[in-house]
Amino acid sequence: MSTLSLQAVSLAVDGKRLLGPLDVEIAPGQVLSIAGRSGTGKSSLLAYLCGVLPPVFVASGRVLIDGEDITSLPAERRGLGILFQDDLLFPHLDVGGNLAFGLRRTGVPANERGRLIAAALASFDLEGFGPRDPATLSGGQRARVSLLRTLLSEPRALLLDEPFAHLDDETRSSIRALVFEEVKRRGLPTLLVTHDAEDVAAAQGPVIRIDGPGGMP
């Protein structure tokens, strides 16, 4: 189980501080929520952590997993999983193919992937869904497949970019509970950015509220 640490992380754009400095440590299985309205830099923070921050931003500070500084590593070597507002399933692949994409990142041999995918689908009440076209899935089913794909890549920490925002109320509640259950079960340090008070309450972890550009608690 890993710990995710942010040390003096700040973001600026056009010479003005957007957020930070941020010093936090997220324990295994803990969800830290960063709450604020759109345009306050929440998603840009996740982009910096992932190593894909657009060059228009200026960032400083360090990101560590279990004391290992990953700040300068390429995105694919950081060991971070991320869920977005959109599920981003590949439309040209069936459900099984989407999940196999996550497994390829861990180096699982091709002859083992089918068994692991079937077991993963069954664990999420999606038994037999491997051959399905993603376009035929409900919103909740797509969200489950997207979560499975991320988990199968065996991330060391998880980032959540308002992943429940586009779901209806009933589905949002069940998917949110599933995500946080998996976070705790797998001991994943997790950073959630959201503007939804219900997300924050369900996360049951520490909260940082951002009121506007440059704003921190």
Image (cartoon, grey):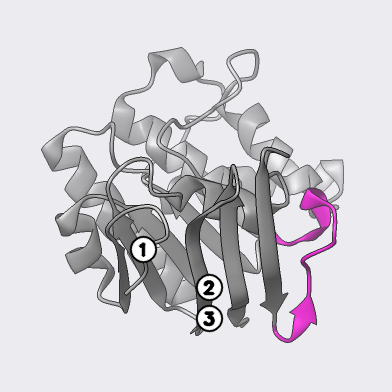
How many neighbours does mark 3 have within 10 angstroms: few (below 14), some (14-19), or many (20 or more)?
A: some
Residue 30: percent from the left, percent from the top?
Answer: 42, 78
Secondary structure, magenta segment, majority class: loop
How many neighbours does mark 2 have within 10 angstroms: few (below 14), some (14-19), or many (20 or more)?
A: some
| Three-letter code, disc 2 | Pro
The residue under label 3 is 23
Q: Which residues are magenta?
A: 66-79
Residue 160: percent from the left, percent from the top?
Answer: 45, 53
The quadrant in which the N terminus is found is bottom right
Q: In this image, 8 relative to 22: left or right?
A: right
Task: Say which element carries label 3.
Answer: strand
| Three-letter code, disc 3 | Asp
Pick whichever, 149 or 9, lies toward us: 9
Which image quadrant is residue 91 in? Answer: top right
Residue drawn at the location 74% of the way across and 86% of the way down: 67
Task: Say which element carries label 1.
Answer: loop
The residue under label 1 is 215
Pick whichever, 78 or 134, lies toward us: 78
Q: Which mark is residue 189?
A: none
Mark sitting earlier along the chain (1/3): 3
User: 67 above or below 104?
Assistant: below
The residue under label 2 is 21
Look at the numbered discs 3 and 2 and tell me whether their residues touch, using CB distance below 8 Å.
yes
Residue 185: percent from the left, percent from the top?
Answer: 44, 75
Residue drawn at the location 50% of the way across and 85% of the way down: 27
Q: Is residue 152 visible?
A: no
Residue drawn at the location 41% of the way across and 42% of the way down: 144
Residue drawn at the location 79% of the way across and 55% of the way down: 106
Q: Is residue 141 visible?
A: yes
Q: CA distance from mark 3 to mark 2?
A: 7 Å
The magenta stretch spans residue 73? yes
Residue 34: percent from the left, percent from the top?
Answer: 36, 63
